[in-house]
Image (cartoon, grey):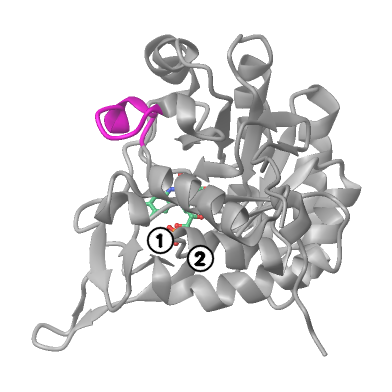
Amino acid sequence: MEKIETSLSVNIGGIQMRNPVMTASGTFGYGSEYADFVDLNQLGAVVVKGVTSVPWPGNPMQRIMETPSGMLNAIGLQNVGVDGFISEKLPYLRDFDVPVIVNVCGKTVEEYLTVIEKLNTTGGVAGVELNISCPNLDCGGMSFGVDATLAYQLVKEVREITHLPLLVKLSPNVTDITVIARAVEDAGANALSAINTLLGMAINAETRKPELANVTGGLSGPAIKPVALRLVWEVYKSVSIPIVGMGGIMTAIDAIEFFIAGASAVAVGTANFVNPQASMEVVKGIHDYLNKKNIRSVKELVGSLKVD
Ligand SMILES: Cc1cc2nc3c(=O)[nH]c(=O)nc-3n(C[C@H](O)[C@H](O)[C@H](O)COP(=O)(O)O)c2cc1C
């Protein structure tokens, strides 16, 4: 059989990427933390830690713990705030030839808008990923991402003030993720990220205390991969915008499974803590898989699940 040239490049909601592998927000710092292990220029995109309108201190310790095949975290979105991000973190990333996607969070719509307005006028931002899992203070702390109306309103208001490519990150902690996915697509999202962490908790049987100071936290890692695959597949069947799949991706084969379920790109998260070079290995493994199977483009895999 004649050997064909494989292409890893993808376009996610207007962001042109050399390959479909991004870093998952909150697991790769602001990029510089991993620069000794990863050539940032070889990534599809760098998605930075969630940024808010003012610096957030995060939750009290204990904030992370290992679980069977995963981890629980309740970091509480500790970050330097949008001004600190623009002045201290972004200049470093601008030196690389890689799209920078800024994950944005807020406790009110206004807080999100404040961050977006500042990112609009800053060079070096390729796109925005809205984390809609934040508690909404105007709604008693209910997350934006669990209510279709709240999610729609937030995304619509953000859409009205920015031309930056807009990814919206879906929460798995909902009854029907497709309702939220369609609402944010209607509100003008260019792409979806799926999934954020699953709510969980851990208890110490000796002390009868929760292991995390925040009591509950977000579960991530291989333990959530089957849930994430199922949700990506459901979302894929419901929307026409591209999906960035994530949740427990440790290897290239995990990533391939997400493409087959309907993701057009993937993000590597918790794996970065176990193996700081995981993202690079995933890029190489996808390339090798395509070559071995004589598949021209990763796009051919997207949504190719064979269901009888
Ligand atoms: C320590 C930690 C911090 C995270 N911080 C963020 C964040 O700031 N914003 C966000 O949208 N998601 C955040 N996430 C969720 C990840 O980006 C990702 O959606 C989730 O962990 C599932 O992927 P994984 O199983 O590969 O880690 C965080 C996850 C972890 C483990």
The local crowd at label 1, few if under 14, some if 14 to 19, many if 20 or more residues have their Cα within 10 Å, is: many
Please name the residue that numbered disc 2 is placed on.
254
Q: Amino acid at mark 1?
A: Met
Is residue 32 found inside the magenta-colored segment of the image? yes
Is residue 60 found inside the magenta-colored segment of the image? no
Residue 19's place in the image compared with 299, above or below, is: above
Corner quadrant of residue 308: bottom right
- Residue 150, horizontal then vertical, whole percent: 76, 54
Left or right of 82: which side holds 236? right
- Residue 189, horizontal then vertical, whole percent: 80, 42
- Residue 179, horizontal then vertical, whole percent: 82, 67
Q: Which residue is at a point 66% across and 9% down the rendered structure image?
A: 121
Answer yes or no: do the residues labelled 2 and 1 have beta carbons within 8 Å?
yes
Q: Main secondary structure of the magenta part?
A: loop
The residue carrying mark 2 has its beta carbon less than 8 Å from ligand 1:
no
Corner quadrant of residue 295: bottom right
Q: Which residue is at a point 62% across and 15% down the rendered structure image?
A: 118
Q: Amino acid at mark 2?
A: Asp
Q: Which residue is at a point 52% across and 27% down the rendered structure image?
A: 53
Q: Is residue 242 visible?
A: yes
The residue carrying mark 1 has its beta carbon less than 8 Å from ligand 1:
yes
Left or right of 191: which side holds 249? left
Q: Which stretch did the figure color magenta?
A: 29-39
Which element carries disc 1, helix, strand or loop? loop
Q: Which residue is at a point 84% across and 39% down the rendered structure image?
A: 156
Please name the residue that numbered disc 1 is placed on.
250
Q: Is residue 212 visible?
A: no
Q: Where the N terminus falls, by quadrant?
A: bottom right
Residue 190's place in the image compared with 199, above or below, is: above
Left or right of 243: which side holds 198? left
Cα–Cα span, label 2 and label 1? 6 Å
